[in-house]
Amino acid sequence: MRFVVSLALTIVVVFIITDVIRELQNELLAQAITDPLTGAYNRRQMEFSLDEAVERHLRTNAPASVLLIDIDHFKRINDDMGHDTGDRVLKALVLLIKNRSRKLDRLFRMGGEEFLLYLPDTPAAAAMIQAENLRNRVAEASMAKGRQVTVSIGVADLARDLGRDQWIKLADNALYQAKETGRNRVVRAEPALAEDDDAGADSDDRRSRQRLS
């Protein structure tokens, strides 16, 4: 009887330890692939996911699109209302996007106030509808007391001759156009926008857009 009781207790302890280890592993995995502030996936996970999307597109020709989303005048929100308010706006935006997206869609934080939403099995026309819907929802939402928050969005669908960086570059240039032409709008990328994809041009585009944000 003592042996049976001891064995049963040992089995219970082993199961408890196993559960604890599994929970710790899940927590470590989540920390490795997500942004700690917003809960969106991080940039490293974005690169991995988009590389997979490119490979899948090459094999199956499945459509895919990305939305590059940037909060308009976010620096002013931080300067005028404080970084705590800015953090709350970031979290509220992520929650809104997740609630308006499908389970298979993936949201990544690129950095600062810029996010990328990956839409698998989604052609450009459907991605534009999703982008306009999100833009309207953000403009109507109450994210910062006494101030309207809006976003600009660049949309790019995946073409067969594009790699991951060129795909992002397309969306990035479209986002820059949305910012330059008034903000709170959606612009779809044209393939020609990806032709000049050297690092210097990319850096210049980002520096220019930072002055607009």
Image (tube, helix red, strand yellow):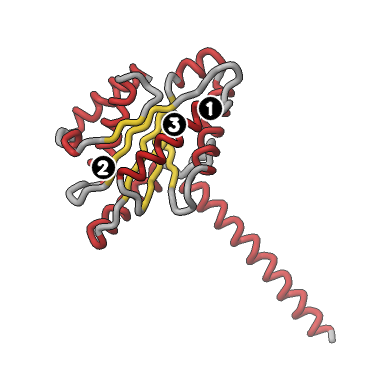
**Which comes sooner in the sequence, label 1 or label 2?**
1
Q: Nearer the viewer, residue 33 or 78?
A: 78
The residue depicted at 43 percent of the width and 42 percent of the height is 108
Q: As displayed, is residue 111 above or below residue 211? A: below
Amino acid found under the numbered disc labelled 1: Glu
Instruction: Say which of 15 and 84 sits in front.
Output: 84
Q: Along the horizontal axis of the image, is 177 left or right of 109?
A: left
Task: Tell me the distance, in whole angstroms, between the alpha carbons under discs 1 and 3.
Answer: 9 Å
- Circle 2: element type: helix
Q: Which residue is mark 2?
A: 167
Q: Is residue 61 above or below residue 111?
A: below
The image shows residue 45 at horizontal and vertical percentages of: 40, 48
Task: Name the residue type under label 2.
Answer: Trp
Q: Is 3 rendered above or below residue 149?
A: below
Which residue does the image show at 25% across and 37% down from the upper left? Answer: 170
- Residue annotated with mark 3: 135
Give coordinates of residue 131: x percent, y percent. Answer: 40, 37
Viewport quadrant of the C terminus = top left
Q: What residue is shown at x 36% (from left), y 45% (from top)?
A: 126
Where residue 189 sits, quadrant-wise, is: top left
Q: Secondary structure at mark 1?
A: helix
Q: Amino acid at mark 3?
A: Arg
